[in-house]
Image (spheres, coloured by chain):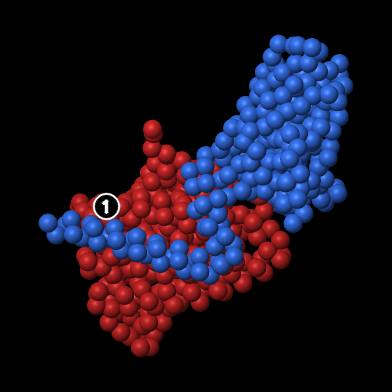
Amino acid sequence: MSIPMELYLPIAGNSVNIAAIFGLGGAVGLLSGIFGVGGGFLMTPLLIMMGIPPTVAAASDSNQIVGASTSGTLAHLRLGNVDVKMGVLLLVGGVLGGTVGVEIIKALRRMGNADFLINITYVLMLGLVGGYMFIESLQSMKKSKAPSEPEPERHTKSNAFARLVAALPWQMEFSRSGVRMSPILPLILGGLVGVLSAIMGVGGGFIMVPVMVYLLRMPMHVVVGTSLFQILFTCINVTIMQSVSNHTVDFVLALLLLVGSSLGAQVGARVGRKLHGDQLKILLASLVLVVMGKILYELIARPDVLLAYAGGH
Amino acid sequence: MKHIMLCTILLLLPCTALAGEGEFSVSPQAIQIHALYNGSTIRAEGIVPEGSQVVLRFLGAPGDVDMKQKGKALGLLWMNMGNVRFDKVPAVFLVASSAPLADMGSAGAALGMADLTGQVGIEPDDADRDVLLPELLKLKQDEGLYREMSGTVTMGPAKDGMQPFTADMPIPSRLSPGDYAVEVHALKDGREVFTASRAMDVKMVGIPFMMADMAFNHGVWYGVLASVIAILAGLGIGLVFQSKEAH
């Protein structure tokens, strides 16, 4: 008598190998715990490769991220890495921005060829964010090795932005992050990320993390915890919305993934603690660039089949 | 009600012979999708006139399929371009035969995938059938839902002008609940000498049934429950790690 390794997923309408799903969940959870990104941009394509329909893959992944980010947020809370005040402001901005983004995408679809714009936005965003983070962290790693080197003119570059930030009203202290700024700034930035992530159909962790690092000037470890905190609420919202309007959440699939990914996220939070901020940044940047390369390749190489089911991405 | 009556009639008859001499039975008579379902195998057995070749088909109900056609934008990038609707596309199309369909003349070819393309309609009317239909078949084959296998029906020794056959046909796990049909065709000298069909009911039972019912009929509760369980599982795993660390 052998242990059954295959499980039928009623919403996906397919059976999957339990061990493969656990493994996938664990690997993506590890990355999510280290970098504070939801991992949707990696998990969804891998699930599709395993034969899960695209819409079910994306929606079930959101459900899975709810569990993984709960576990990750808890781990980071204990380590004192969550700036709740900042997270809530970003979240409020994100929800408002997301609503605007959904309307933009509807308008684009009416005009036709919105998919083209989505993919191009994706490639450009990933390329810009990944490239900038990569170069910046490489420079600061070099700098820390040779401390006698003169400071480059980075301060003058951010001066205009810094003056604008300082001029905003209602300046307040964000003690966890050790920064002082107006709540308007995280609201606006959260809103912009919300618009972009709605257009691209992703959680936005990989854009939010660089925004917190470079524009809100938060320390990398607090960024990761706060990002997970915010992703938790975004994905609860997506899970419920998808369940109601599209019936695409496969709860069995999500549960399998999340057991794997919650374990991975716990390990990831500890691994991340051992790495330096610059190392974290350069690893995340490499990951983002690899994903960008994959999307770019798919855009240029001739697909196997010249048809795709409507309703997916 | 109509559906139940039809099933009852079909269950009472050993098989519904449409033409010619012969008979066949199929087991199991229905497929139940339970929590550990991972595809199944159906067995068809029967007798047909001596010297004929047997074609076994497992067919899903025909329906409309909405697709996006991929094309090259700006001469460089592959994108989803136009919308295409295929109609009368069988959900599943599995064919097993005792010899290659191509060797059975036009009657044999009419039972295969190649003939299917003649029955499928495409919207818009100006869509390129010669390009799109082979792509549709390729996609369905990649999904394991369309398949043609020759030599998988075994013919037994002939007796009294009749010949027995058996075939085991694997059914993919990617199967939606619904009404399916199992057909047997016997061909001899390029002509059909026997045809019969049995209905095959595919339904979800147990946990998959309960979950699908909740997801489709009580979406809000399903979504809330899915989120709550995910949070509890995440918290549970987090706490396990915390207690381990404390020791």
Q: Does residue A310 appear in the picture of this structure?
A: yes
From the viewer's perspective, tell me whether residue A77 is left or right of residue A64.
left
Secondary structure at badge 1 equals: helix
Q: Does residue A152 appear in the picture of this structure?
A: no
Q: Which image quadrant for residue B135? A: top right
Which chain did the image draw in blue? B
Give the residue at x 70% y 50%.
B68
Residue behind mark 1: A267
Q: The numbered mark 1 sits on a residue in which chain?
A: A
Above or below for B198 versus B1: above
Q: Colour of chain A?
A: red
Give the residue at x 64% y 56%.
A311
Residue A14, horizontal then vertical, whole percent: 55, 45
Q: Amino acid at mark 1?
A: Val
Q: In which quadrant will I find the C terminus of chain A?
A: bottom right
Give the residue at x 79% y 12%.
B160
In the image, A246 versus B195, the foreground residue is: B195
Give the residue at x 52% y 57%.
B211
